[in-house]
Amino acid sequence: MLYTFYLCALTTLLSVGLGLPLAWLLSKTDLPRSGLWKSLFTIPYIVPPYVGAIAWLKLLNPTSGSLNLFFKDLFHLQNTPFNIYTLWGAAFVLSLFFYSFILLACTSAFENMDASLEEASRMCGASRLQTFKKITLPLLTPALLSGIVLVSMATATAFGVPALLLMPVRKFVLTTKIYTDVLSYSGGIMKAASLSVLLMILGLIGLWLSSLFLKNKRFTTLTGKYHHTERLHLKKWKWGVLGLLTAVWGIIVFLPLSTVIISSFLKVYGDPISLSNLSLRKYQYVLFELATTHRAFFNSFFFATTAATLALVIGAFVAYLKVKTTMKSRHWVDLLATLPYATPGVVVAIGLIIAFSGSYGLNLYNTVWILIAAYTVKYISYSIRNTAASLEQLDHSLEEAGRMSGASWTKVFLTIVVPILKPTLIASWFLIFMPTFGELTMSIFLVGPNTDTIGTLLFNLQSYDDPQSAAVLATVIVFVILTANMTVKKLTHGAYGV
């Protein structure tokens, strides 16, 4: 519990320190191509954090990390300067992915603020710093706190990064302790269930504290009147800021991703990068000779496709009940369908193991169906929220016209509602497919002898078998996810995706 708390605190601190200044720069200054910079800095939002852990292990491993060895030789040190196998190391890696929660939440808040409030403060003689402290920051507080809660909960429920960086040095957080308990034989599942309840309680306490803090913190910044967003002119600082942003993006996004990609092409890892040391041999081995890769890719694609389709159909139906009907229990149906998303993935996995391991007459354990069920219930809220938001903008007169023309409810739904919602439905499907394709946290608990996924295969290769083959697999996963993201952006004209 203490390690979980420390990790959450450190990750949140680093995420705010990185995400808040970036949000301010992208939203409140006249930075050129700010939209492009926002897309570049939100790439970590869609890349699994455990891929980043693999990258930074290759860079900051205390014995063989290339960046560590570079600094050691540069400054003539006796020992390498950094050790990734620490709480600070795990928090550093997690923050390089979870800062995007702060960035997205605060960027939206900055862009929706009425600039006249800040202008009024400046006209009264306040400096920019005083205006930020007394006007901007209080208006930003709800969005910032929302981002902090998301970062804290995501950190508390993360598995891949703590497993790769803390378990080797015998430091356990709640998720990794649950994992080791499940693997043990004597009452392990019951210990894991107890810790899962504790993890869920911590998450609920976080949500309760957030709602308590926000209870009396309501600020009206959207008045229905036109307002412009005041942009700070960078002037002579513009090129310096662009250079700084380029350096920061290079360190937190380009460096780790390029490290993984280059490592996947090396013949001998650790030797200098040269044409003679580059080869496609590892790709041939992983993609065509390693039998488990074919099974894992097929499983992941099948599980993600099936779960995304099921979640889309069920979610669209629940959203329709919520928005377009007067059924008294429709809000309870919506709550039950979206509750699993607020529940840590570890808790969902343990609950499914206990419920469907034969104790209650239905045994799905070690089958494909328990994984599909886990992915569907965990991410169905994506479909519900997106579809409900679009349905609320759909005028009732369109459906009424269809029914007055003699069409049944099914025909009205399929010929009027679905075509209008097509961009939203496509986006929802991809938004579910992307996280489930490389999912690790639930999968590591639920995979059976023949149901291993691409995420669990990558974890096992990195942890036990062949880290260089893991780099190949990580590169392929990133390629698939980025391709899916570009597809959904193109199909929805930029309305969805990052």
Image (cartoon, grey):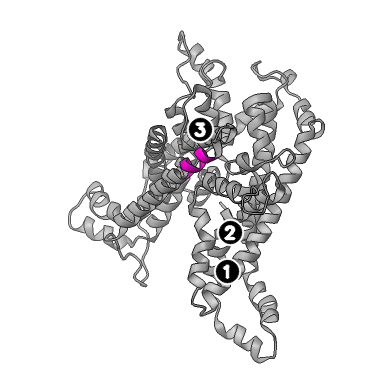
In the image, what residue occupies the spot 67% across and 53% down?
Answer: 362
Where does label 2 land, which residue?
380
Q: Amino acid at mark 1?
A: Val
The answer to whether residue 466 is visible is no
Q: Is residue 195 magenta?
A: yes
| Cα–Cα gap, marks 3 and 1 | 36 Å
C-beta proximity under 8 Å, tags 3 and 2: no
| Cα–Cα gap, marks 2 and 1 | 10 Å
| Cα–Cα gap, marks 3 and 2 | 26 Å
In the image, what residue occupies the spot 68% across and 91% down?
Answer: 405
Residue 154: image location, x then y, percent? 47, 44
Give the left or right position of residue 306, taking residue 181 as reference.
Answer: right
Where does label 3 land, which residue?
162
Residue 148: image location, x then y, percent? 39, 47
Callout 1: few (<14), some (14-19), or many (20+) C-alpha neighbours within 10 Å?
A: many
Q: Amino acid at mark 3?
A: Pro
C-beta proximity under 8 Å, tags 3 and 1: no
In the image, what residue occupies the spot 68% across and 60% down?
Answer: 309
Judging depth in this view, the residue of 194 and 168 nearest the camera is 194
Judging depth in this view, the residue of 403 and 363 nearest the camera is 363
Where does label 1 land, which residue?
318
Q: Is residue 264 magenta?
A: no
Earlier in the chain: of badge 3 and badge 1, it is 3
Give the left or right position of residue 283, taking residue 36 as reference.
Answer: right
Residue 181: image location, x then y, percent? 54, 34
The magenta region covers 190-196
- Viewport quadrant of the N terminus: top left
Kind of element beneath mark 3: helix
Callout 3: few (<14), some (14-19), or many (20+) C-alpha neighbours within 10 Å?
A: many
